[in-house]
Image: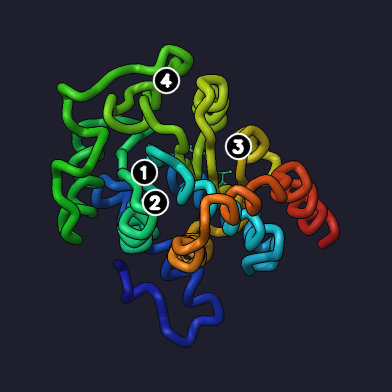
Amino acid sequence: MTGEYVPENHPRTESLRIRHAIIDGLKNNVVAEAGLIAHGRGEALDYLIGEKTNPFAIKAIEAAAALLLLAKHPVFSVNGNIAALVPDETIDLSKAVPLALEINLFYRTREREEAIAQVFTSRGVSEDSLLGIALDKRTEIDEITHNRRIVDNRGINVADVVFVPLEDGDRTEALVSRGQKVVTIDLNPLSRTAQKSHITIVDNLVRAMPILVNKVNQLSSNSKEQLEKIISDYDNDLILKEAEKAIRSI
Ligand code: PTJ
């Protein structure tokens, strides 16, 4: 963290701290150059939702927790921004559900795969359990033309629920067309990913992830029927409309 650039008494200390985590991630090969642009877009949208976790996000987080707990083979698709901003929460979620972590990159290079793997192995995750990097386990999803088509045949390829925060729309559509359930976190309720996912958490990744981990822990003792009820009562179109309304009414 480039902490020296982040004065403690600055009115936007937290926002600067997060921004510098992304910049450090770029320097360490974790974040793609386009990840900075994505982050800037996220910052702008975060202003518009009041830089807080709104009720529409809380409802989506509860449904996401229920869906992840009900899944037989849930997989968390990890990209550069996630590794830079919420590595600890990502590991917490992988233990709480439990779910597999798969590194899946739009701007895929061997250097970035290794740098992102290092973020997790340095925090105690075993290299063997990190999917998406072993060359002999790779396969390709026909429906996707770009790099995200490269998936692990133990992970995203066979997952029933895929968690894809900060995503580009193509893959979400492809996963949905393959019959897989998709959960995302995206500050833009109008993005294709937000629109096509089954559950869309319109919130900043940094705020939403710890809440999601807590929610999974809280719901983990619920019965299958109780979890199914949470999902059947949930309406993602309504949630997206509420998020869009919050942005337009500012
Ligand atoms: O690491 P890679 O190579 O897999 O690349 C990752 C990026 C993020 C560069 C890639 O997936 C990409 O280009 O994504 P997009 O198309 O820019 O979409 C990112 C979406 O996430 C946008 O809708 C942003 O508004 C949103 N976003 C950005 N930062 C945050 C966010 N949503 C939630 N929390 C954030 N902190």
Closer to the eye: label 3 or 4: 3
Within 8 Å: ligand 1 and the Cβ of disc 2?
yes
Residue labelled with disc 1: 78
* Label placed on residue 42: none
Query: Marks 3/2: CA distance?
Result: 18 Å
Residue 197 spot, x, y in % from top left: 60, 37
At horizontal 69% and vertical 67% (from top left) the residue drawn is 50
Q: Earlier in the sequence, mark 4 or mark 1?
A: 1
Q: Is mark 4 on a helix, strand or loop?
A: loop
**Residue that carries the numbered disc 2 in the rendered image:** 82
Tell me how far mark 3 sits from mark 4, CA to CA. 19 Å
Cα distance between the residues tagged 1 and 2: 6 Å
Which residue, given by chain and number where applicable, does mark 4 sit on? 146
Question: Horizontal and vertical percent for residue 42?
Answer: 57, 52
Q: What element carries label 1?
A: strand
Mark 1 is surrounded, within 10 Å at the Cα level, by few (under 14), some (14 to 19) or many (20 or more) other residues, namely many
Of all residues, the one furthest to the top in this rendering is: 142
